[in-house]
Amino acid sequence: MKWTRNRFLPVSYAVVLAALAVVGCTSKQDPAETLLVCGNASCGDLVMVTTDTSSDGFHYLNPSLSPDGSRILFTADWWALPSEPKDPGDVYYVNYRQMAIIPVREGVEPEQDLPSQGAELIRLQEANIMLSGELTNLATVLNDDKGDPIWQDDEHVIFFLRLPRVGNRLFRADLNDPGALPGLATIEPLWFEPTDAESAPRSWQHMNPSLSADGRWLLFTRSGCAIPDSLETCSNLAIYALDMSTAGANDGYGGLAFPLTAEYSRIERARFAPDGRRIAFSGGLDVAGRNDSGTEIFTIAFDTTGLAAGTMPLDRDLERITFTSYAEGDPLTGVLNSDPSWSADGRDIYFVSTRRAPTTTLHDRNVWRVPADGSQDPAIHFFSRYDDLDPQILPDGSLLLSSMVGFPTGMLNRLEEESYQRIKQENEQAHAANPAIALFNETQLRQLAANERRQLEYFSGVMAHLYLYRGI
């Protein structure tokens, strides 16, 4: 594809978004705020992190910026970075997700694949763990489903790995262990259920890890799902905290983990406020004592007073932050508000919502912002008319996210113009060498350049790429 030629794009490019007043989104009084009309995406700079064109359907999700700001950890479909040389089992893993790291490079052009952008697959070294009453080698599951990766520090990542008989469990990978085999990361389990050591353990799922700013506490969701990510088979969903000073003790069976919430029909993605005093999470309406459909954003206080004595209350200082009303045409399953992420100063919470974005009746997922005390209605923060997912607010206030917006309009405009100039130059050179070759007229040149542009327009709504967004 001609788009992979070595041409330079600027560090950032503006994308634009049409947005008018937000109407009918909450049960409070409708806000009067009118957003700037800027086109088809939010006003601001949108930097494309992954730019590959190797597939019509790869999804790059769960981005997490390394503490030193140089790399982004994320999950990808297996075939985005198949093992080299290819393992005969690669076909078997086609539905599994894997972990990868890509350097932060802004302003790069489309590439044929992720390796061309410096992305690397995280490969895991074999390990033995005590499971179901016997020592179990993980060689057969290391290429199984992995997800929700986060950085513990610049050399360690935390993620869940699907294990036989017991479900998803949280592990830590050491990316630079001097004792590891070349190209492999060593792993250790962080916390096992006491019943995991029994011959007939119950299936529990540990997912959505999130660290406190000081690294002392790890939040995760614990559920009794028979099938991971299948809410129809889930029960006993709650937020747990793991004392990281005890993580991995006694081969994973000696850690201190405890519930922070009662068990509800739906609990997802909990994250600490920057000061570690409160936790934001997404929960079903039964968290608020109601039976409505959909999910809302809640916060609780994080205070371990009473833990040692067994008197620490659940749902401590529970507050509901979002109040979503419903209108004609809303999905029967309710509006979903999920994936909360705190601003660096702790004043705001950013989250993904299926509520209607401005000027559209579609319920694609977009990123919204609400004061952390719930004192005002949510306001749109990033809107692309496609699914926008997995937001993470960075220390400088920019937004790291996954989106299906495709190649931004500003980028396409520049590439189309570059294609026009290249095609014109090549045609003139060919004509000079051989006058029998006709010169293209202006209409033909523009049409050929537009045809190349359409090759990239196809990816909108098809691939989920990673982006950095800086609003204005």
Image (cartoon, grey):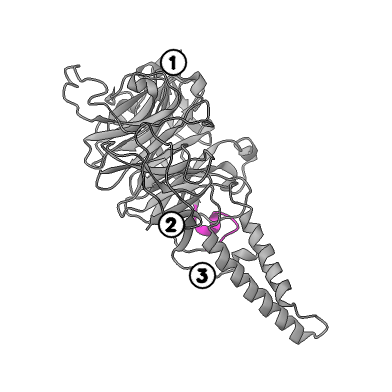
- The magenta stretch spans residue 112: yes
82 or 449: nearer the viewer: 449
Inspect the image, locate mark 3, and give the three-letter code of the amino acid beneath it. Answer: Phe
Per the model, the C-alpha gap separating discs 2 and 1 is 49 Å
* Span highlighted in magenta in the image: 109-119
Q: Quarter-wise, where is residue 25 in the image?
A: top left
Q: Secondary structure at mark 2?
A: strand
Q: Which residue is mark 1?
A: 202
358 or 66: nearer the viewer: 358
Q: Is residue 36 above or below residue 212?
A: below
Q: Earlier in the sequence, mark 3 or mark 1?
A: 3
> Could you tell me if residue 197 is visible in this image?
yes
Q: Quarter-wise, where is residue 223 in the image?
A: top left
Q: Is residue 318 above or below residue 275?
A: above
Where, quadrant-wise, is the C terminus in this rendering? bottom left
Q: Quarter-wise, where is residue 236 in the image?
A: top left
Q: Which residue is mark 2?
A: 43
Q: Which residue is mark 3?
A: 8
- The magenta stretch spans residue 397: no
Q: Secondary structure at mark 3?
A: loop
